[in-house]
Amino acid sequence: MQKLILILLITFFLLKSYAQDFTGGIIFGVCGSQIDGDSQSRYKKPGLIFGAYVQKPISDNGALKIEMYYIGKGAVFNIDNPDGTFFQEFNHSLHYIEIPVLYNLEIHPKINVAVGIASSYLFAHKFTLIKQEVDKNYYSIKDFDFQPMGQVDFYLTDRISSSLRISYSALSIRNDDVWYNNNLSVALRYTFE
């Protein structure tokens, strides 16, 4: 994880140093995810998001934004017990490095919308079924995923904004079945000068 943070910081500062009209910052947030096709439902699997982004204006109210971050995805199914406790029947954890490319449009001084596509690299995953770890090869998860995404940013100050984003896999994330990552995320962004 320390290597990932170092790579993100180096990438951000290298990109920022090449052009003065770029802006950039850091991203930190949470993701609620589910996997469509796995018989589970609802956004019950929480995950973290952290990384960096750079943005370059390309018109008076439009900009191109490139991000790079870690994101945790997956699915979970808990069975509620009568005494208020629960039993975890299924837990599917996916860990990605994601690189979205977005077109960002200012529609109000405090509100931006963005659309784009992200490529994701799966660097780790774990499956447990009734508290027993399942062989990773059993699920045949693909190493790469691509998702169209949409986002709304609300500026709290000139440098701090909050984002609401939805993304959905364009292709199945499994080689031998039809599963799709389905994610809702909320993040805070801090922009450096």
Image (tube, rainbow, N blue to C red):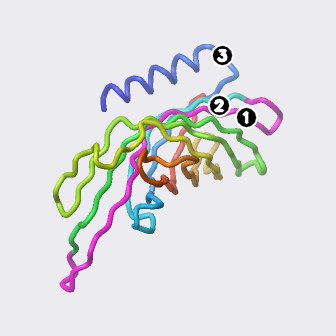
The answer to which image quadrant residue 38 occupies is bottom left
- 86 left or right, relative to 1: left
Residue at 75 percent across and 43 percent down: it is: 105
Going by the picture, which residue comes out furthest to the top? 18
| Residue 20 location (% of width, % of height) | 67, 18
- Residue wearing tag 1: 63
Q: Main secondary structure of the magenta part?
A: strand
Q: Determine contact: label 1, label 3, CB under 8 Å.
A: no
Cβ atoms at labels 2 and 1 below 8 Å apart = yes
Q: Earlier in the sequence, mark 1 or mark 3?
A: 3
Label 3 Cα neighbours within 10 Å, binned few <14 / some 14-19 / many ≥20: few
Residue at image mark 3: 19
Q: Is residue 122 rendered to the left or right of residue 58? A: left
Residue in the picture at 57% in, 35% down = 191
Q: Position of residue 66 (x, y in %)?
A: 60, 32
| Position of 23 relative to 119 (above/below) | above
Identify the residue under disc 2. 55
- Tell me which label, 2 or 1, sits earlier in the chain: 2
- Whether 9 is drawn above or below 39: the answer is above
Q: Residue at x 36, y 46 (%)?
A: 94
Q: Which amino acid does label 1 sit on?
A: Ala
Q: In the shown orientation, is residue 88 left or right of residue 144?
A: left
